[in-house]
Amino acid sequence: MLENYRNLVALGHQVYKPAVITQLEQEELWTRGGGHPVGAPLGDQSHRMSVPRSSVHAKWIVGKVIGTAMQKTAKVRVTRLVLDPYLLKYFNKRKTYFAHDALQQCTVGDIVLLKALPVPRTKHVKHELAEIVFKVGRVIDPITGKPCAGTTYLESPISSETTQLTKTLEELNISSTQ
């Protein structure tokens, strides 16, 4: 029944949901001369159902590199959330782009920022690599700026040595004042 309702909406019929569900349960959906379903309100157009369709033509895209087999080209997978209008739930929608990587600096797993080209380079390559946001294996927490592995922060040897020297200096200052 719900599938039939979706088909009616997809075909462009503007129907009022409670009225048409009753008719679909009885399997008696006939249309009037104007293509209006029986039971749908005629005069008041505020009850029309419309599913917003939007197309995304982004100039900047963030994605993950999934292939670098072609010369100076990176294969990037972009995942975005799309709302299902009937279930009112978001689902992942994946799309793959080919991006021009002039310096061949990408590796599989990098998170990259792509910029749309004004004129496509080839039939498939329509973007270029603008920046490597996160290099694979070197993850930096965007809030603190510290390197991390999973949920723990990695202390670099230089920073741990600096902390040790600071503690020693504080101890010397405390002992010299006494």
Image (cartoon, rainbow, N blue to C red):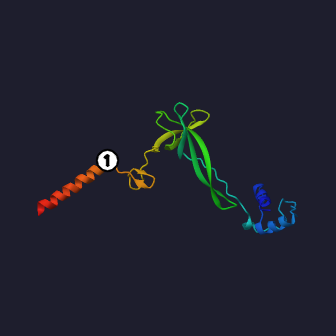
Q: Secondary structure at mark 1?
A: helix
Can you identify the residue that label 1 sits on? 157
Identify residue type, mark 1: Pro
x%, y% of residue 86?
Answer: 70, 61
Task: Depth check: give the residue in front, 168 or 5.
Answer: 168
Task: Work out whether 91 lies above or below 105.
Answer: below
Q: Residue placed at 78% from the left, 56% from the top?
A: 7
Task: Depth check: give the residue in front, 6 or 40.
Answer: 6
Q: Residue placed at 45% from the left, 53% from the top?
A: 150
Specify whether residue 113 is in view: yes
Quadrant (top left/top right/bottom left/bottom right) for the C terminus: bottom left
**Badge 1: residue crowd in 10 Å (few <14, some 14–19, many ≥20):** few
Quadrant (top left/top right/bottom left/bottom right) for the N terminus: bottom right
Left of 157 or right of it: where is 166?
left
Task: Depth check: give the residue in front, 86 or 70.
Answer: 70
Q: Residue placed at 68% from the left, 61% from the top?
A: 87
Q: Residue placed at 72% from the left, 67% from the top?
A: 46
x%, y% of residue 75?
Answer: 56, 38
Task: Work out whether 37 lies above or below 92.
Answer: below
* View extreme (top): residue: 71
Specify whether residue 61 is in view: no
The picture quadrant where one finds residue 32 is bottom right
Left of 53 or right of it: where is 169?
left
The picture quadrant where one finds residue 14 is bottom right
Task: Depth check: give the residue in front, 14 or 94.
Answer: 94
Tag count: 1
Task: Work out whether 48 lies above or below 162.
Answer: below
x%, y% of residue 85?
Answer: 68, 59
